[in-house]
Image (cartoon, helix red, strand yellow):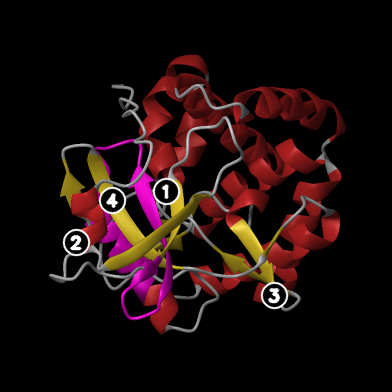
Amino acid sequence: MRIPVSRPVPGTPPDEVVAAFGIASVGSPLRPSGEDAENWTAERADGTRVVLRFERYGGRPFDAIIGLSRRLVASGVRSVEPLAAVDGVDVVRHTSGDWTCWRRIDGEPVDPTVDAARSAGALLVDIHAVDPGGPGPEPWALRWLDALGERDPAAAQRLADLRGPARICHGDLHAANCLQVGGVLWAVDLMDAGVADPALDCAIAAAYWGASGGPAVPQAFLAGYSARRGVDVGCSPALVADAAALLLLRDGALGDPDAELLAEFLTVWDSERPA
């Protein structure tokens, strides 16, 4: 497996990118001071409030992912809307890297509580209800499946079996990728999205919610999903552990601080998870 190269994050969006997306003014980065910023608030010349996003890791089918995002918005799913550049392209490819533009959602951050997890599970049902319209890219996390297979072949095979039947999957629906607007959750940051079995997406999301909120939170997430869908998703506690192990490999390879939380969650989940 080839680990994606992390591109240096520019201090501010380049002038060429700003012009390409018709930006009149660039605001503040959407990261705390001292961290690399990948997203900036901005406003277009027509007054549209947007977020400019720098794609730190290349090698992903960004155009296809944005196409999936558009299908969600067109179907009425509470999901962030991608906006094309002035010349109609979805991804501006600059010497610094790839850039995308999204309509800004004014919402509040979401804490990884049991109630929020239950609401996120219901939101994911709405995402999965949308037909992808044909074959699409796999969720980005599956890029690390071979690495997991070297350590736990059985877990890797269980996840590989979930490459179909295919529905649109968010691929990264944790608390930090949700915003609360008027008492309901919206999904943001779909750049790990793809097409796969909904159970895989549920396992990835449940693992992340558990890593940030504790072992009761993924159970609430899956309960919220099943209640909204009307049937059990078929995402067992063992499958959540498999997904957590996969994400641990990914985040560890990328130097993501979530790796430590995932490692702690796996230890607790293996001892406390329901049968």
Q: Which mark is residue 90?
A: none
Callout 3 amino acid: Arg
Q: Position of residue 131 (x, y in %)?
A: 38, 74
Badge 3 is on which residue?
A: 228
Note whether 139 is above or below 141 in the view shown. below
Structural crowding at the residue carrying mark 1, measured as other residues with C-alpha within 10 Å and reported as few (<14), some (14–19) or many (≥20): some
Task: Please tell me which residue lies in front, 208 or 246.
Answer: 208
Does label 4 or label 3 sit earlier along the sequence? 4
Badge 1 is on which residue?
A: 192
Nearer to us of marks 2 and 1 is 2
Nearer to us of marks 4 and 2 is 2
- For numbered disc 2, what is the local secondary structure? helix
Does label 2 or label 1 sit earlier along the sequence? 2
Q: Is 230 displayed left or right of 14 in the figure?
A: right
Q: Quadrant of the C terminus?
A: top right
Count of numbered circles in the view:
4
Callout 2 amino acid: Ala
Nearer to us of marks 1 and 3 is 1
Magenta span contains residue 39: no
- For numbered disc 1, what is the local secondary structure? loop
- Report how far apart the C-alphas of labels 4 and 2 lie in the structure: 10 Å
Q: Quadrant of the N terminus?
A: top left
Structural crowding at the residue carrying mark 2, measured as other residues with C-alpha within 10 Å and reported as few (<14), some (14–19) or many (≥20): some
Callout 1 amino acid: Asp
Q: Is 176 displayed left or right of 221 in the figure?
A: left
Badge 4 is on which residue?
A: 99
Does label 4 or label 2 sit earlier along the sequence? 2
Task: Please tell me which residue lies in front, 15 or 219.
Answer: 15
- For numbered disc 3, what is the local secondary structure? helix
Q: Which mark is residue 20?
A: 2
Q: Position of residue 96 (x, y in %)?
A: 23, 37
**The quadrant where residue 71 appears:** bottom left
